[in-house]
Image: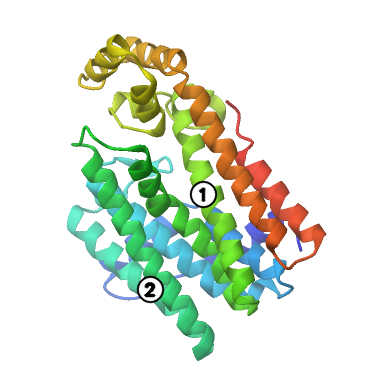
């Protein structure tokens, strides 16, 4: 296996050379624009890594890795429209740079283009990749709808929230890794285990995102701290605080999540204080740890060398080792 930087360079070079010089330009230019904005490109990197875990040259998985990244960016284009977001990766979103109709149509085209990348594989592998991709794409849509539904619900449960982040975020991480296993033609057991590894790591990562949104260092986190609190999002932290709070804390938290003041600094600090007082912050950290360990447990069942298990574990540890 190679260093992470090797996979990053491969993906970066591949997308730099990816040009869609087709007509009509107003359909394809927005696609090139969003794909060339970069980002971490963690999902395609996972596909390449997973292929080499099972002793096959990662370049064979470039088409599958590209499909995952094109789909991920398609979902971002449509999410930005739904959220009326002005910026993506520090640049104008597609619907702001062009218009909403262009964003919808170019997004639709990206979904189809993602499928076309599977055509590079022989029928057996193509069928397995397409089947997994269809299942995952539908789950991502379901996860997004759950997220939208939760905005207006006051009775969201912890299991419902975990299902939402599993579908919206984690299934794509699991699928990215399983696609590498499919291209490598490893055993079905290995393919399912590496999917579970990615899935549980994806859940842990999203829970950590919830935690860092409230308690992270703004410089290392890279986002506005307290963003979820400002938007009254019912994250794992909020749900645990509601579960553990006494009557006064519950009433205060409910009130704080019903207002949108011009200056949010007092609101953010008050909410964080309740998160700490109720020990919701501790419960969230424990959940992050539990899902990370759950991911590592699957590695022990995988039929690969101990060296490769160590590489995957180190990758997982580095992924979760963000500053708080």
Q: Is residue 183 above or below residue 167?
A: below
Q: In the image shown, does 239 or 101 lie closer to the viewer?
A: 239
In the rendered view, would you say 56 is above or below 315?
A: below
90 relative to 294 in the view: left or right: left
The mark closer to the camera, 2 or 1, is 1
Q: Position of residue 133 (x, y in %)?
A: 42, 70
Q: How is the image coloured?
A: rainbow
Q: Residue at x 68, y 57 (%)?
A: 299
Q: Which residue is mark 2?
A: 113
Label 1: few (<14), some (14–19) or many (≥20) C-alpha neighbours in 10 Å: many
Mark linked to residue 202: 1
Residue closest to the far bottom: 123
Q: CA distance from mark 2 to mark 1?
A: 25 Å
Q: Quadrant of residue 185?
A: bottom right
- On the picture, is 178 further left or further right than 138? right
Q: Is residue 16 left or right of residue 293?
A: left
Quarter of the image that includes the C terminus: top right
Query: Of residues 66 and 145, which is closer to you in this image?
Result: 145
For image coordinates 28% across by 29% down, the residue present is 231
Residue 28's label in the rendered image is none
Where residue 266 appears, x then y in whole percent? 33, 9
Could you tell me which secondary element the residue under label 2 belongs to? helix
Q: Position of residue 37 (x, y in %)?
A: 45, 52
**Residue 12 at what x, y percent from top left?**
58, 59
Q: Secondary structure at mark 1?
A: helix
- Residue 212, above or below 246: below
Binning the other alpha carbons within 10 Å of mark 2 as few (below 14), some (14 to 19) or many (20 upward) gives some
Mark closer to the chain start, 2 or 1: 2
Q: Which quadrant holds the N terminus? A: bottom right
Q: Is residue 31 visible?
A: yes
């Amino acid at each position: 296996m190679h260093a992470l930087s090797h996979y990053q360079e491969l993906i970066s070079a591949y997308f730099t050379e990816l040009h869609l010089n087709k007509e009509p330009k107003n359909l394809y230019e927005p696609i090139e624009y969003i794909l060339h904005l970069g980002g971490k490109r963690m999902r395609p990197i996972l596909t390449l890594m997973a292929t080499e875990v099972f002793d096959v040259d990662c370049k064979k998985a470039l088409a599958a890795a590209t499909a995952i990244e094109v789909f991920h960016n398609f979902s971002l284009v449509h999410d930005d429209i739904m959220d009326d977001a002005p910026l993506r990766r520090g640049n104008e979103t597609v619907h702001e740079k062009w218009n909403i109709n262009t964003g919808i149509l170019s997004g639709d085209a990206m979904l189809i283009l993602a499928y076309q990348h599977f055509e590079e594989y022989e029928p057996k592998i193509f069928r397995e990749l397409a089947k997994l991709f269809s299942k995952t794409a539908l789950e991502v849509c379901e996860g997004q709808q759950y997220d939208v539904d939760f905005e207006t619900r006051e009775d969201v449960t912890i299991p419902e929230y975990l299902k939402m982040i599993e579908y919206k975020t984690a299934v794509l991480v699991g699928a990215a890794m399983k696609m590498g296993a499919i291209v490598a033609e490893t055993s079905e057991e290995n393919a399912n285990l590496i999917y579970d590894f990615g899935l549980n790591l994806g859940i842990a990562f999203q829970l950590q995102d919830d935690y860092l949104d409230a308690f992270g260092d703004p410089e290392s986190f890279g986002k506005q701290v307290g963003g979820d609190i400002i938007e009254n999002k019912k994250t794992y932290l909020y749900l645990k605080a509601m579960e553990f709070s006494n009557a006064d804390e519950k009433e205060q938290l409910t009130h704080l999540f019903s207002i949108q003041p011009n200056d949010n600094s007092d609101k953010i600090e008050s909410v964080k204080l309740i998160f700490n007082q109720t020990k919701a912050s501790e419960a969230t950290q424990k959940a992050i740890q539990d899902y990370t360990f759950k991911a590592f447990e699957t590695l022990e069942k995988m039929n690969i060398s101990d060296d490769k298990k160590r590489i995957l574990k180190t990758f997982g540890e580095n992924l979760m080792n963000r500053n708080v």
